[in-house]
């Protein structure tokens, strides 16, 4: 029996107990990246929190199957996004095909996705693999009276639904209706303002490079249709959890539900999991504000990608998180201390099974309680402070890391593989290096030389390098 698990379901607007259709099994769908630009660290936060959800469900005894799409076509429609136009222009300028560009950004995405400790989805499907499935769904929607052809495009008719704004409260519905009414990009083919395109043959993007034949002419699919089709292709007519960022709620997930449930004739997905934005001091992080801050960029600046994961896990997925380099520096210091404490643990005998189970239970309770990852990290600190032997602590660190994925033991091994030095001598060396640096700064080269000689006498050689002062025992 799986452990009781709760999280916030955007559809019911409350924290709910999770009950999958099949005991102990979870079918999960995740909206994947659009691969005409880099995924910024805010996008990666969403994938980190989803990964924590999957691994927490695993810790609670569930077996999760997860499917993700890759948007390599068709996202040029409703979210008018100048960045993407630039990318297509870039493809032309660099004499690359759009598919080459898509491959480049897919690889870049997974490099960052993997670097932060995420497990790859069981199925990853590019949208361009599923054109016949999209056409079939659009045809069926037309047959059932939920879609119509106008001006060469196929549109979903939102007036056919009793409740289109499924995620929204009455107040939010009014706000959304005002927003939709005020939308400057008016498409005169639409019968209702909220209708959306299922298949394009005509759009403002006349230079769309990828096109396929269809019953409505040569064109390409709308963005929303791909998630409905790809999830049904691999997970069938029902899914337990659908994940995404909060900015997917409207219109993307709202439209996914509209077309999926109209096509199927029944409820499609019961639980919707959304993680909140990453902000910087100026507001929401986005790709349109100049250079894109990616995990790879953080790495180039010398940050460990798992420190970024640690930073994200310390905050709740439903709260906006503010990113700054100062905050990341603090996370680095805390992470290094944590690794040092793990490195100090010795294999000192048998694991105390009762104590281990007790702490594992607390950890499971934390992650099963609306994915309280910061509490889970607090319990890790509690373990390190607890009056139990090191072997038990090590076993718990390993157990918790199956969810946290911070590679704490791997980092700790990296530390202990360094020179085996008496801690007192190490402190002396670091102190001497600091004194020497101060002396050099004050142009007191005599003292600086004396400190170097003093160290040599103790068998320590120092070298000035670009990365700072290095020392070794001779
Ligand atoms: Zn989607």
Image (cartoon, rainbow, N blue to C red):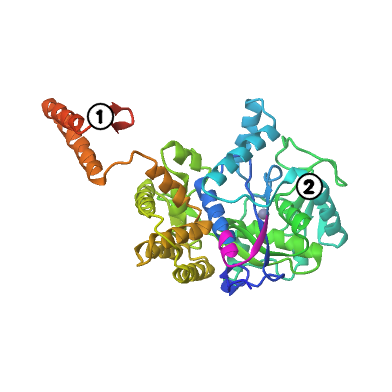
* Residue highlighted by disc 1: 461
Residue 121 lies within the magenta run: no
Q: Is residue 54 visible?
A: yes
Q: Is mark 1 within 8 Å of ligand 1?
A: no
Helix or strand or loop: what does disc 2 sit on? loop
> Neighbour class for label 2 at 10 Å: few (<14), some, many (≥20)?
some
The answer to which quarter of the image holds residue 35 is top right
- The residue depicted at 31 percent of the width and 27 percent of the height is 465
Residue 62 lies within the magenta run: yes
- Expressed as whole percent of the image width and height from the top left, the position of residue 190 reads 75, 55
Helix or strand or loop: what does disc 1 sit on? strand
- Expressed as whole percent of the image width and height from the top left, the position of residue 389 reads 38, 63
* Residue highlighted by disc 2: 130
> Neighbour class for label 1 at 10 Å: few (<14), some, many (≥20)?
some
Q: Where in the image, quadrant-wise, is ligand 1 located?
A: bottom right
Please determine whether, in this image, residue 162 is positioned above or below residue 373.
below
- Expressed as whole percent of the image width and height from the top left, the position of residue 406 reads 47, 52
The answer to which quarter of the image holds residue 463 is top left
Sequence-first disc among 1 and 2:
2
- CA distance for labels 1 and 2: 63 Å
Asked if residue 297 lies left or right of residue 171, the reply is left
The foreground one among 54 and 461 is 461
Asked if residue 159 lies left or right of residue 287, the reply is right
Q: Residue furthest front?
A: 349
Asked if residue 382 lies left or right of residue 14, the reply is left
- The residue depicted at 42 percent of the width and 49 percent of the height is 282
If the image is split into quadrants, where does the C terminus sit? top left
- Expressed as whole percent of the image width and height from the top left, the position of residue 158 reads 74, 62
| Residue extent of the magenta highlight | 55-66
The foreground one among 15 and 345 is 345
The answer to which quarter of the image holds residue 214 is top right
């Amino acid at each position: 029996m799986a452990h009781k698990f709760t999280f916030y379901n955007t559809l019911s607007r409350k924290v709910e107990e999770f009950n999958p259709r099949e005991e102990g099994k979870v079918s999960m769908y995740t909206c994947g990246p659009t691969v005409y630009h880099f995924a910024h660290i805010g996008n990666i936060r969403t994938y980190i929190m989803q990964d924590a959800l999957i691994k927490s469900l695993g810790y609670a005894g569930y077996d999760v199957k997860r499917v993700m799409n890759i948007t390599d076509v068709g996202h040029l429609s409703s979210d008018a996004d100048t960045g993407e136009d630039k990318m297509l222009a870039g493809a032309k300028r660099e004499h690359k095909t759009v598919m080459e560009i898509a491959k480049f950004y897919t690889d870049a995405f997974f490099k960052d996705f993997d670097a932060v400790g995420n497990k790859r989805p069981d199925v990853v499907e590019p949208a361009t693999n599923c054109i016949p499935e999209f056409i079939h769904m659009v045809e069926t929607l037309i047959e059932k009276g939920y879609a119509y052809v106008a001006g060469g495009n196929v549109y979903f008719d939102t007036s056919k639904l009793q409740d289109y704004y499924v995620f929204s409260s009455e107040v939010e519905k009014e706000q959304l209706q005002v927003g939709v009414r005020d939308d400057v990009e008016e498409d005169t083919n639409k019968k209702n303002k909220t209708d959306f395109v299922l298949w394009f043959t005509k759009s403002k993007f006349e230079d769309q490079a990828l096109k396929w034949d269809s019953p409505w002419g040569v064109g390409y699919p709308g963005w929303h249709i791909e998630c409905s089709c790809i999830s049904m292709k691999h997970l069938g007519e029902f899914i337990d959890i659908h994940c995404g960022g909060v900015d997917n709620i409207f219109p993307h997930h709202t439209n996914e539900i509209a077309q999926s449930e109209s096509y199927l004739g029944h409820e499609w997905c019961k639980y919707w999991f959304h993680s909140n934005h990453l902000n910087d001091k100026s507001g929401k992080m986005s790709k349109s504000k100049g250079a894109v801050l990616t995990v790879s960029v953080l790495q180039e600046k010398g940050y460990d990608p798992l420190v970024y994961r640690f930073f994200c896990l310390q905050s709740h997925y439903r709260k906006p998180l503010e990113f700054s380099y100062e905050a990341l520096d603090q996370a680095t210091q805390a992470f290094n201390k944590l690794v040092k404490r793990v490195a100090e643990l010795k294999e000192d005998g048998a694991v105390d099974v009762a104590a281990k189970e007790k702490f594992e239970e607390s950890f499971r309770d934390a992650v099963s309680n609306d994915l309280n990852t910061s509490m889970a990290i607090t319990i890790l600190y509690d373990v390190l402070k607890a009056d139990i032997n090191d072997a038990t602590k090590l076993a718990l660190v390993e157990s918790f890391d199956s969810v946290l994925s911070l590679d704490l033991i791997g980092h700790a091994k990296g530390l202990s593989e360094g020179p085996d030095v008496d801690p007192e001598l190490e402190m002396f060396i670091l102190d001497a290096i600091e004194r020497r640096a101060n002396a050099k700064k004050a142009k007191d080269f005599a003292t600086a030389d004396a400190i170097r000689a003093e160290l040599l006498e103790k068998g320590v050689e120092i070298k000035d390098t670009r990365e700072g002062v290095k020392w070794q025992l001779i």
